Image: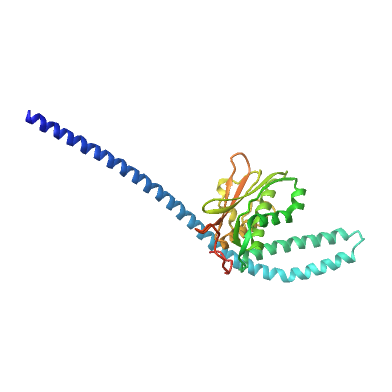
């Protein structure tokens, strides 16, 4: 009888120990799963940081090169523009008037390219103020309305009242470049949707188009300087937008839509008190 009791006690102790081990194993498995997920997140962030560092290095090198090229080209181009304008006026009303006008138009196109290169290369000093994000987006849209009408774009806009700290003029360049990119993706027209929003971490702007979309291998490349999938693109519009967003401690992400087209998300970080980055005055350079 005594042996039976001891055997039952031993069996009970063994059962309790087994349950305790199972509980410990379950907790250990949860801990391992959690640590694995955290490691994957950190690896993803590390890869993103490495890509960002590589892009910044290219931006600095390309910026220095672009500034030198613009300086060398701008001086003779100004003279050519002056002479072409004078020639166009002299030939007004003659059979050669269209040819002279074509020269002037081409020079203006070159000047536009050089202006974009300067925006990319120049170390701008932003002026940070409280900015109503919706008003800044609306101002950018208004400047592009003639182009929107010509391209047969159906515009859908939903703007909220978020306040961020930023340089309104620089941000207009960002929004205009992103909107123009969306319009150019829809050669035959389509719907362009622009939405602002906010969550616990970010104030956001989303620009969605119904174009051909961006291939997975190009999703990271599109922000690199001089990379373009368009025949007449300079490859600087999105680079400039990316650079300005860096100045605002923000970033841009491009996503391929499930059905068709692409969506660009612009993220402006918030402080713990719910407002955006503190006001600062520093050179707008790639970091």
Q: Is residue 154 left or right of residue 256?
A: right
Q: Foreground: 203 or 62?
A: 203
In the image shown, does 177 or 200 lie closer to the viewer? 200
Q: In which quarter of the image is residue 15?
A: top left
Picture coordinates of residue 11 (x, y %)? 16, 33
Residue positioned most to the right: 93
Please identify the quadrant where the N terminus is shown: top left
Q: In this view, does 277 lie above or below 257?
A: below
Question: Which residue corresponds to the image point at 63% horizontal and 41% vertical from the top-left?
Answer: 260
Residue reaching furthest to the top:
1
Q: Which of 38 and 6 is in front in this view?
A: 6
Q: In which quarter of the image is residue 119?
A: bottom right
Farthest residue toward the left? 2
How many marks can you see? 0
Above/below status of 197 relative to 84: above
Is residue 72 rendered to the left or right of residue 278?
right
> In the rendering, at what x and y percent does residue 57 appear?
53, 63
- Residue 56 position, x and y percent, is 54, 62
Q: As drawn, which residue projects farthest toward the front? A: 273
The colour scheme used here is rainbow
- Residue 134 locus on image (x, y percent): 65, 54
Please state if 10 lies on the left or on the right of 124 as rendered.
Answer: left
């Amino acid at each position: 009888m005594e042996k039976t009791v001891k055997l039952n006690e031993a069996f009970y102790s063994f059962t309790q120990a087994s349950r305790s081990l199972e509980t410990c194993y379950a907790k250990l498995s949860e801990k391992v799963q959690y640590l694995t997920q955290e490691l994957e997140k950190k690896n993803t962030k590390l890869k993103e940081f490495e890509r960002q560092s590589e892009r910044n290095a290219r931006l600095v090198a390309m910026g220095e090169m672009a500034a030198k090229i613009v300086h060398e080209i701008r001086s003779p181009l100004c003279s050519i523009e002056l002479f072409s304008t004078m020639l166009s006026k002299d030939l007004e009303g003659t059979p050669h008037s269209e040819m002279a006008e074509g020269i002037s138009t081409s020079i203006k196109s070159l000047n536009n390219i050089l202006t974009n290169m300067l925006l990319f290369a120049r170390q701008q000093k932003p002026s940070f103020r409280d900015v109503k994000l919706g008003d800044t987006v609306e101002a950018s849209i208004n400047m592009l309305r003639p182009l929107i009408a010509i391209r047969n774009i159906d515009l859908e806009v939903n703007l909220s009242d978020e306040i961020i700290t930023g340089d309104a003029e620089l941000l207009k360049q960002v929004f205009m470049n992103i909107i123009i990119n969306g319009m150019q993706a829809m050669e035959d027209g389509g719907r362009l949707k622009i939405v602002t929003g906010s969550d616990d971490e970010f104030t956001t702007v989303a620009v969605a188009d119904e174009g051909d979309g961006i291939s997975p291998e190009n999703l990271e490349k599109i922000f690199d300087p001089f990379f373009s999938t368009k025949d007449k693109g300079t490859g600087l519009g999105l680079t400039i937008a990316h650079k300005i967003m860096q100045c605002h401690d923000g970033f841009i992400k491009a996503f391929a839509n499930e059905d068709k087209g692409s969506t660009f998300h612009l993220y402006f970080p918030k402080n713990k008190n719910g407002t955006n980055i503190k006001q600062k005055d520093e050179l707008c350079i790639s970091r």
